[in-house]
Image: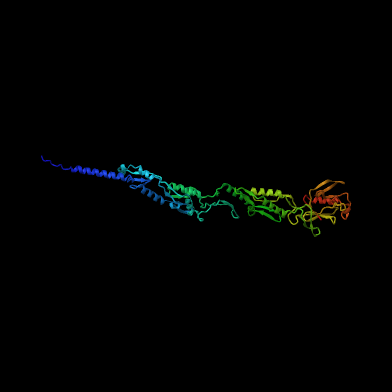
Amino acid sequence: MKRTKRKPNTRNIALLTIILLILGIYLYFVNYYRTHFYRSSTINGINYGNQTVSEVEEHIASDIASYSIHISGRNDVEDVITAQDMDYHYISDGQVKQLKDDQNPFLWPVGLFRSNAVEMDATTTFDADLLRESMKKLLFFNETNNIAPTDAYIDYSEDDGYRIIEETYGSQVKEDVMYDALTDAIAQNETLLNLETIDCYTNPSITKENEAMNAAVKKANKYTQLTITYDFEIATETLDASTLHEWINISDDFEVTIDTDKVAAYVDYLGFHYTTFGIARDFTTHDKKQITVSGGDYGWWINKSKEREALLATIQEGKSVTREPEYYQTAVTHKANDIGDSYVEIDLSKQHLWVFKDGKMVVDSKLVSGNHAKKYDTPKGVYSITYKQTEAPLVGEDYDTLVHFWMPFNGNIGLHDATWRVKFGGNIYKKQGSHGCINLPYAKAKIIYQNVEKGTPVVIY
């Protein structure tokens, strides 16, 4: 019997061929994705599909090499730090390979339709010294840009008195703060850095709002915005801001004090010009002769220690006043020789006196002065009546006498009646004079007593 050959099943062959083709394609891509990332793979949001580990690392390295950080600051100054400025580069540490190895090549078809997104912190490094060196070359550190701040301070002017001059903020960058901010920004892969937002500038330590400084200005103006006037009849001396501000000291911690040495110097000035105690005086005698009288304790005598205290207290009170200095003693007037026109004039050589009141002679008299032979001479000079007393006992080593009109002017030396004498004037004083007092006839002494007061000048020459 004759056999017939069976023809191949074309359909089966075609199916087998397709299966083998698909299998081949599948195996091809299994092998392909052993060394490549899935087509839909992203690392840190960047698509690295169908790339090898080395290609991905090259891309990362290139991206890091192009890194730069833009820095902005005060006064619109801007500059840039680049990767090259600090030798900023990528270090291959196996992370990318590990990500690829975590990928199952047999599941590559899944990767065609599903995103394979991963995150990775790329390992980088930079040269810290080079970064700091490059940072110092930025525009922020130029002399014209790196301006130090200034503190608010107190100033004085004639027009405005004490006032606060405002602080300036400048643009002086704090180097260490900026460096730390840069390293943090680089670590975070940030590309913008605003120095104003990170307290990167040196600020003034004292501002116009400083409470102590404002209090000091108020206090200093209180001390200087006043007028203190001394009226000496023949002249006035005025203290105002033009002088007082030179007496004010304001310490670094804004304590306001008055320079007591300058207060004392000013009082010394007043004392020098207006103290007349003990000076030699020009004097016009009863017969219109011009003489000079020295000695005595008459005159204006400023008490400097008390006046320093009083002047300081007046300034601290802050009120304008017209005042007289504190005196140890006063005189009749500041005018001319400060004797005025009511006084007792005694000429020892003539043994005579004249009493003037309001410019008119009211009495004159012979007298007996201190015993010259016993050296009890009545002292010359200008004095003043210390007080007046009637019926006063005068007691000494060799005398005890009651006088009716007692007018001392130099300690225990004074004018008084001497009823035990019958004669006055001439040369009696040379051998039979007093113990220094001015002896007068009773009637004359009474008139003199009625016309002099405490403080009436006594001029003896």
Placement of the C terminus among the 4 image quadrants: bottom right
Q: How far across and down, in percent of the image, does residue 192 sit? A: 44, 50
Residue 313, how many percent across, how many down? 66, 48
Which of these two is toward me, 218 or 461? 218
Q: How is the image coloured?
A: rainbow
Q: Residue lying furthest left in this view?
A: 1
**Residue 133 in view, yes or no:** yes
Image location (x, y in percent) of residue 202: 52, 50
Using residue 3 as the reference point, say whether residue 352 is left or right of it: right
Please count the marks in the image. Answer: 0
Percent from the top left, x then y, of residue 436? 84, 51
Question: From where the camera sits, is residue 112 visible?
Answer: no
In front here: 335 or 74?
A: 74
Front residue of this view, candidates 358 and 19: 19
Q: Nearer the viewer, residue 139 or 51?
A: 51
Q: Which residue ends up furthest to the bottom in the rendered image?
A: 289
Seen as rendered, the residue at the extreme top is 1
- Image check: 182 left or right of 275? left
Name above or below for residue 11 compared with residue 433: above
Q: Is residue 211 left or right of residue 80?
A: right
Identified at 68% across, 54% down, the residue is: 237
Q: Quadrant of the N terminus?
A: top left
Residue under the point 66% across and 54% down:
238
- Left or right of residue 337: residue 97: left
